[in-house]
Image (cartoon, helix red, strand yellow):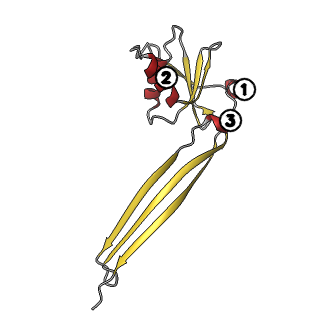
């Protein structure tokens, strides 16, 4: 298996708390988790595999907004399988959707715009701060919302 480097117990707990909506199904040897942590899902698969060190061949099923993507096995060779409609329905029973299983997160995005050289207003700056978050309504449906705070300074030169 790829990535058999061991983690300490404290590191394992820390890694596992990074993953949202984590469910381990020991009967089917599947691990379901929300894929929001990394842009490249392979990094999350390897990290989760190292934290959950099991002797059996485990299939990892990352989800995006509660919707399962595919099944992945970190064996040699690497395997990826599409999930059938029946498997998706079974996953919906094993991993029921709940808004409380997602972490509340927000993002603060500053933006500064400066304009120079206009005859009437030679110097103008606009500063805004965007506070953005998302609310999971149901499986596959997310409401993105935000508040924008604007501040503008205009300097004019009088003759």
Quadrant in which residue 27 is drawn: top right
Which is more foreground, mark 2 or mark 1?
2
Q: Which mark is residue 13?
A: 2
Say which residue label 1 marks. 93
Mark 2 burial class by Cα count in 10 Å: few <14, some 14-19, many 20+: few
Residue occupying image coordinates x 38% and y 74% = 153
Location of residue 127 in the rendering, given as x and y in whole percent from the top left corner: 40, 65
Mark 3 or mark 1, which has the lower sequence index?
1
Provide residue 53's location: percent of width, then percent of height: 48, 13
Is residue 78 in sight in this rendering?
no
> How far apart, in angstroms, are the residues tagged by discs 2 and 1?
26 Å
Residue carrying label 3: 98
**Coordinates of residue 122 in the picture (x, y in percent):** 30, 79
> First in sequence: mark 2 or mark 1?
2
Whether residue 39 appears in this view of the structure is yes
Quarter of the rendering occupied by the C terminus: bottom left
- Residue at horizontal 70 percent and vertical 30 percent from the top: 96
Q: Looking at the image, which residue sits at the far bottom?
A: 159
Tag 1's secondary structure?
helix
Instruction: Report if the CB atoms under discs 3 and 1 are less than 8 Å apart.
Output: no
């Amino acid at each position: 298996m790829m990535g058999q480097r061991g983690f300490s117990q404290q590191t394992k707990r820390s890694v596992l708390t990074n993953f949202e909506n984590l469910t381990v199904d020991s009967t089917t040897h599947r691990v379901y988790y929300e894929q929001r942590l990394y842009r490249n899902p392979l990094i999350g698969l390897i990290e989760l595999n190292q934290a959950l060190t099991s002797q059996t061949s485990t299939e990892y099923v990352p989800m995006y907004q509660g919707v399962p993507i595919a099944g992945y096995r970190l064996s040699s060779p690497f395997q990826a399988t599409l999930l059938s409609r029946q498997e998706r329905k079974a996953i919906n029973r094993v991993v029921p959707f709940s808004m409380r299983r997602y972490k509340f997160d927000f993002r603060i995005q500053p933006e500064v715009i400066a304009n120079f050289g206009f005859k009437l207003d030679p110097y103008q700056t606009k500063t805004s701060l965007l506070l953005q978050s998302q609310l999971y309504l149901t499986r596959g449906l997310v409401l993105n919302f935000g508040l924008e705070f604007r501040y503008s300074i205009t300097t004019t030169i009088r003759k």
